[in-house]
Amino acid sequence: MRLVIIGGGNMGGAILLALVKTEAVSPENILLIEPDQEKRENLTKTTNCVSQAEIDETIRGYDLLLIAVKPQAATPAMELLAQWILPHQLVISVMAGISLETMQSALVQTKLVRVMPNIPTLIAKGMSIFFASSDVEKEEREWVKTLFSACGKCLEAKDEDAIDAATAISGSGPGYLFYFAEQMTASAKSLGFSETDAQLLVQNTIRGATLLWESQQISPETLRQQVSSPGGTTQAALNHFEEKKVGESIKDGIQLAYQRAKELSS
């Protein structure tokens, strides 16, 4: 498997680092294309991959072309790519809001995969979901699974709409958790803890709760009930959240995120 990564920003760089670290793809089989000299040189030095500044005919020697540029840079990147791409090459996009229809129109290419990773990919703990066009063969789907399993967990979707749904759940989800962690940290500080101690309390609470959930293999509802003694401290807070309809507000917010993802993909 020979791979081109177009874009060495946060996500492209994270994917490159994860692939090399896990040995999913050897550095000599990866070509990084990144116009920013500093980013390009840093990633090349760290990973020992091949790199260059611009898209050109060199890409024709590779099997997979992964586009990891920002959505606003999608059109010029795909216009350049369309000049050199070959029909047998598989194009994978991690660009948020860029539909397969838009990619097919710009690239005149039918072997396409759309992926929604999330920010924990930066530490190889990401959650990615992908949808492949009908022309993508089984072996090529396995390539995609290999690439993104190196970055964390990977799931294949049954339809493209699931990519927009996942954008609202796993894609944006870290932002929701960071928001809740922000409020918990602020509360800890207001109760007398230092910034350092408040962050330690909240980080380890979230980490421990997540690991417990994974190890128990039961629903979060069941776990919540187990830690909520009637008349106790946890239940006092949960009663307030219910009174303020926090749960409904969260679901409404996620629905708005989904609707926005659909708008961006149209």
Image (cartoon, rainbow, N blue to C red):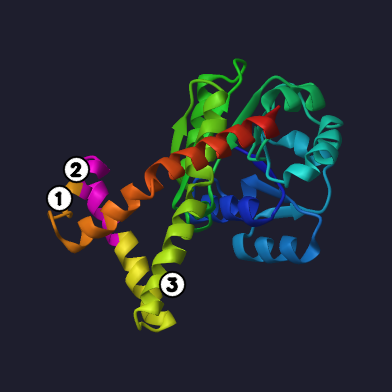
Magenta residues span 208-224
Q: Secondary structure at mark 2?
A: helix
Front tag of 3 and 2: 3
Residue 84 percent coordinates (x, y): 83, 32
Q: Give the residue type at disc 1.
A: Gln
* x 44%, y 55%: residue: 177
Question: Answer yes or no: do the residues labelled 2 and 1 have beta carbons within 8 Å?
Answer: yes
Q: Give the residue type at disc 2.
A: Thr
Residue 147 in view, yes or no: no
The dot on residue 226 is 1
Precedes in sequence: disc 3 or disc 2? 3
Q: Give the residue type at disc 3.
A: Ala
Residue 144 percent coordinates (x, y): 53, 34
Residue 190 percent coordinates (x, y): 39, 78
Query: What is the C-alpha distance between the residues marked 2 and 1?
Result: 6 Å
Is 32 in the magenta? no
Q: Which residue is mark 2?
A: 222
Residue 263 percent coordinates (x, y): 68, 31
The dot on residue 186 is 3
Q: Secondary structure at mark 3?
A: helix
User: In the figure, is residue 219 to the left or right of 173?
Assistant: left
Query: What is the C-alpha distance between the residues marked 1 and 3?
Result: 26 Å
Precedes in sequence: disc 1 or disc 3? 3
